[in-house]
Image (tube, coloured by chain):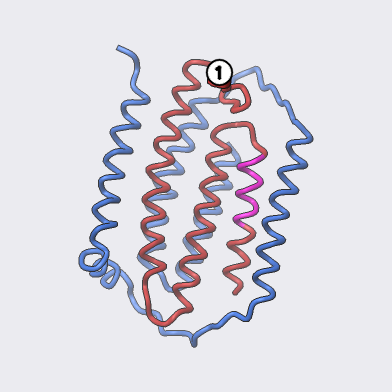
Amino acid sequence: MHAAFSLLVALSGVAVLYIFLGADFLAATQLLVYVGGILILVLFGVLMTHNIGAVTVNLNTGQIVLGTLTSLLVLGSLGLILYRNVWFRHSDLPFEPTAYSIGESLMTTHLLPFELASVLLLAAMIGAVMIARKEG
Amino acid sequence: MNYLIISAVLLSCGVYTALTKTNAVRFLMGIELILNAAALNFVAFSRFSEGAFNGQLITIFIIIIAASEAVVALAIILNIFRFRQSINIDEAHTLKG
């Protein structure tokens, strides 16, 4: 439960970072879809599957150690890559509203992923309704 | 470059959450963190390259795919909870030979 609220803060933080990077439409989309959609779903999942009473905390310490090791390995290798490279950075372009250009390229040059994404959403909706239906 | 560091930290937190937690909903939260880290990476690269919006377009599709995957995953988790009254992913091993 607290983890879901921390995830809310993390996702809003990513949306703010999108604004810093000049992606205003993307920040609004992230807030609407991720925080207002997926996070509400996750909260529903947390609340509906809440084990009242029997909270079996089987902390497998070997698992935690391996998980920490793997995540530190990922972070270490990424940090190595980041700090050894010479990052070629263009000068700061002025911020401009992106909604028009994104919409235009979605409708002209990136039409196929757009249609495929709508088919994917339809399939996901139908699949989710079919899976979570009560029997009979 | 700082954005890449942030995305790397988010990725490692997501990987830790996805590998360690036995709760299925926590696992899903870790996957969402990983996806967000990748999306942030894409947008950071698109900002610092000349005038192309490709990173932001890919991020829109990442958001769409993450939404549909979260929906289906939660439907499956609710179904498993209905049958077993527990969402410990270590206990859901009836398909194992």
| Residue stretch rendered in magenta on the structure | B10-19
Q: Quick one: A36 or A63, which is closer to the camera?
A: A63
The residue under the point 45% across, 69% down is A19
Subunit under mark 1: B
> Residue A13: where, in percent of width, then height?
53, 59
* Residue matched to label 1: B94
In this rendering, the answer to whether A37 lies above or below A103 is above
Comparing B1 with A73, the one in front is A73
| Residue placed furthest toward the top | A136
> Residue shown at 48%/15% (left/top)?
B83
Q: Secondary structure at mark 1?
A: loop
Q: Quadrant of residue A110?
A: bottom left
Q: Amino acid at mark 1?
A: Thr
Label 1, residues with CA under 10 Å away: few <14, some 14-19, many ≥20: few
Image chain in red: B
Q: Quadrant of the C terminus of chain A?
A: top left
User: x%, y% of residue A62?
Assistant: 78, 35
Residue at x 55% of width, y 54% of height: A10
Residue A80: percent from left, percent from top: 70, 68
Query: Residue extending furthest bottom?
Result: A91
| Front one among A25 and B4 | B4
Name the residue: 41% across, 60% down: B59
Task: Supply the letter of whichever chain is blue.
Answer: A
Q: Is residue A86 magenta?
A: no
The answer to whether B54 is drawn above or below residue A127 in the figure is below
Residue A119, x across and y down, in percent:
26, 45
Tell me which secondary structure the magenta stretch mostly adopts. Answer: helix
* Numbered label tally: 1
Q: Quadrant of residue B18?
A: top right
Give the residue furthest to the left.
Answer: A108
| In magenta stretch: residue B12 | yes
In screen coordinates, is B38 left or right of A123? right
